[in-house]
């Protein structure tokens, strides 16, 4: 398995533009997580899905952020409109159902810069 | 609510020195505990985990951690660090009723050759 695949690796965009981050979880994993990492706030859980259904989105900062998982092999995190304070590394992770003793598997992340 | 505290934000060691990174958590029920490592510019990788049984767990690359329930701690140790251990280390916890993994703020380790 190629692991959790995220795209793009780097994204630079202007304030006000729409940004879409993509994630392909490991095949067979039931859970998918979106995290944001910044120097100031560390790793923050934004939202997670179970069997493609959003379970907890309490970490999503505001309405400008939305996430979808249309099928078991694909998820998107969208920011519209983007702002400079959204600049961060966004990680996607996936895992088996509860009882999994392997923890999460993380993707390589998308480094977003909003100018 | 669950929380994780890593009190050492930056640690600098020379090669061959021993390492211990502190991690304390706040949660009243059964917990699962993890240590992840993030090498510069890379994603998080699992070092080791504790679910039950022997409180002393061994992970990859010579790392180990000890779960002390009475102290709500899960400290990471390595007897002799190498330059290649330079990275950021994250402690994480999830409770048995939640699948959310809560991370500590991380400890940046610099190992000098």
Image (spheres, coloured by chain):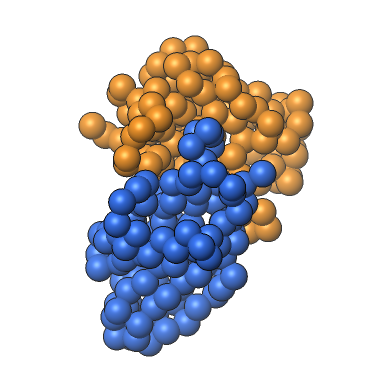
Q: Locate residue A91, reporting x and y percent.
A: 50, 41
Quarter of the picture holding the N terminus of chain A: top left
Above or below for B107 versus B13: above
Residue B8: image location, x then y, percent: 56, 73
Classify residue A67 as left or right of residue B70: right
Residue at image x 34%, y 86%?
B17
Indicate left or right for A17 with B65 as reference: right
Q: Which chain is blue?
A: B
Quarter-of-image position of residue A93? top left
User: Looking at the image, can residue A25 be seen?
Assistant: no
Q: Quadrant of residue A41?
A: bottom right
- The residue sitting at the top extreme is A70
Residue A8 in the image, given as x and y percentages of width and height: 47, 35
Residue at image point 41% right, 61% down? B67
Q: Is residue A105 above or below residue B109?
A: above
Image hue for chain A: orange
The answer to whether B26 is drawn above or below residue A47 in the figure is: below
Residue at 59% over, 30% down: A47
- Give the quarter of the figure containing the C terminus of chain A: top right
Left or right of A65: which side holds A22? Answer: left
Q: Residue at x 44, y 63 (%)?
A: B68
Q: Nearer the viewer, residue B31 or B112?
A: B31
Residue B109: x percent and y percent? 46, 73
Q: Nearer the viewer, residue B9 or B35?
A: B35
């Amino acid at each position: 398995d190629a692991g959790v695949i995220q795209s793009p690796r780097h994204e630079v965009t202007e304030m006000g533009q729409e940004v879409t981050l993509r994630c392909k979880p490991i095949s067979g994993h039931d859970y998918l997580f979106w995290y944001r990492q910044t120097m100031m706030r560390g790793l923050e859980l934004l939202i997670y899905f179970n069997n493609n259904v959003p379970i907890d989105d309490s970490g999503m900062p505001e309405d400008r952020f939305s996430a979808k998982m249309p099928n078991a092999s694909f998820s998107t995190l969208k920011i519209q409109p983007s702002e400079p304070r959204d600049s961060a590394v966004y990680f996607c992770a996936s895992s088996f159902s509860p009882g999994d003793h392997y923890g999460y598997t993380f993707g390589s992340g998308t480094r977003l810069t909003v100018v | 609510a669950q929380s994780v505290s890593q009190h050492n934000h930056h640690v600098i060691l020379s090669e061959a020195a021993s390492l211990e990174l502190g991690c304390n958590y706040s949660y009243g029920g059964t917990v699962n505990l993890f240590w992840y490592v993030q090498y510069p510019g890379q994603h998080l990788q699992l070092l080791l985990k504790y679910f039950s049984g022997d409180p002393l767990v061994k992970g990859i690359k010579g790392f180990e951690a000890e779960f002390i329930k009475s102290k709500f701690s899960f400290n990471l140790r390595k007897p002799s660090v190498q330059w290649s251990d330079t990275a950021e280390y994250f402690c994480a916890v999830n409770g048995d009723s939640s699948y959310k993994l809560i991370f500590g703020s991380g400890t940046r380790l610099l190992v000098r050759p």
